[in-house]
Amino acid sequence: FNPFNPNETFISSFKDGLLEFNEFEPTILYDQNNSGLESLVLPNNPDFVGIRISASEFDANGLLWLMNSRVDRALKSYNPSTGSWQGYSFSDLIENPLSDEVGFFDMEIDRNGTKWIGSYSNGLIAYNENIPNEPLRNMNAADQNIQPFTRFTALAIDDRNQLWIGTTFGLRVLFNTTGFYSDPTPSLSQIIILEDGIPKELLEGQIITDIKVDGSNNKWIGTVDSGIFYFSSDGQNTIYHFTTESSPLPSNTINDISIDSNNGIVYIATTRGLLAFNAGGSEPQESLEEAFVYPNPVRPEYDLLGSNNLNDINKGIKVSGLTENVNIKITDVEGNLVAEAQSRINFRSSSNNYNFAIDGGTAIWNGKNMVNQVVASGVYLILISDIDSFETKVLKVMIVR
């Protein structure tokens, strides 16, 4: 989907090129005859046509970047506004594109404009056309003490511009994407957690199929046979682990994950069907102008929560439309502090949430005060302050017990 034109969609194919849709109607098929796309060339069959388009991503300037497998200029860019194409050679890395690289799994573009590409045979590839001397680099599995023949299958850039990498042998993170080109020996890191007091590598040996980052900077990670995991932003806490045994998930093989940033609904594609899960949270907004509280009023029959488990998004009082870094105070009409939370400190997966937590653009309150008692009937003020811009907003919510 084109983020700058919601009516425009591009669908890539394994053999026939790139199909453009406008307002859900197919309008043009880009191939080797009408675009910068190329077909692979089989020496014994010159008439063969195979335009293999795999990973694709829009950048911040509205350019569509995509991988054109098994050709010399494997990276392509397309400007939908001008109709212009550009190709970028990978010959310094992939000498024979027909035999040295079967294809590419995923692509992510970071804040610096670097295109990160997960490949089948050449590890993690980075390309930045703005780096004058060495725009193309890669990191092989062997260089990173990862099992031989590891495929780099899934990539995700998080809110800290860190690259989360799924492979056929587990999870890795490139923490310093900004310094990648200036570092002669960049390295990928494991996430080490404590399990029953014993250090352990997170998702060790798992075949990872997809990674998505939500509005809270938490990570959804799909696997080939262990279902789907939902981790805190640093990977230290497992918020959810869904399998066919513990949830309505139709299969433990996850093909794809997509998140609706407006409402936090996670769509999970498996080999046996699609599942939607309301995880809560949302993408932060640019301003507090549209911030609102719901339900309002809170009627007696509504279940606030009754506990400190803020992960049940179907309960509790929600404040949505928040910016990225806010402090929220809830007071009664006399000005007594009832609850308080701050972005990046009081999130749902943290032990610091204490009755009130913020996940991205949404906060959830279980209706309890600072001494852990459910508040009485009345009107409560929600005082929101953006810590970075100093923008403020005041909301009111009525609770009827």
Image (spheres, rainbow, N blue to C red):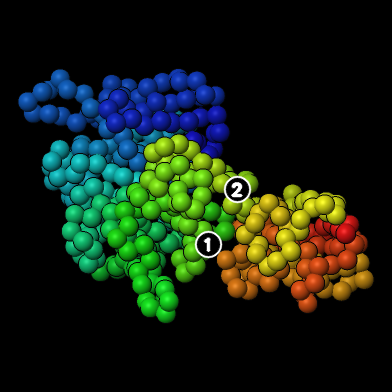
- Position of 166 with respect to 243 (left or right) is left
Q: Is residue 244 above or below residue 79?
A: below
Q: Residue furthest front?
A: 245
Badge count? 2
In percent of the image, x 19 and y 31: which residue is there?
40
Amino acid under disc 1: Ile
Residue 87 is drawn in which quadrant? top left
Residue located beneath label 1 in the image: 239
- Along the line of sight, which residue is nearer the eye, 246 or 141? 246
- Vertical placement of 302 versus 307: above or below? above
Question: Where does label 2 land, which residue?
Answer: 278
- The tag earlier along the polypeptide, 1 or 2, is 1
Q: Residue at x 74, y 64 (%)?
A: 306
Given the image, on which type of amino acid does mark 2 rest?
Answer: Asn
User: Label 2's element?
Assistant: strand
Q: CA distance from mark 1 to mark 2?
A: 14 Å
Q: Percent position (x, y) of residue 262?
A: 62, 45
Quadrant that contains the C terminus: bottom right
- In the rendered image, residue 34, in percent from the top left (x then y), is placed at 32, 22
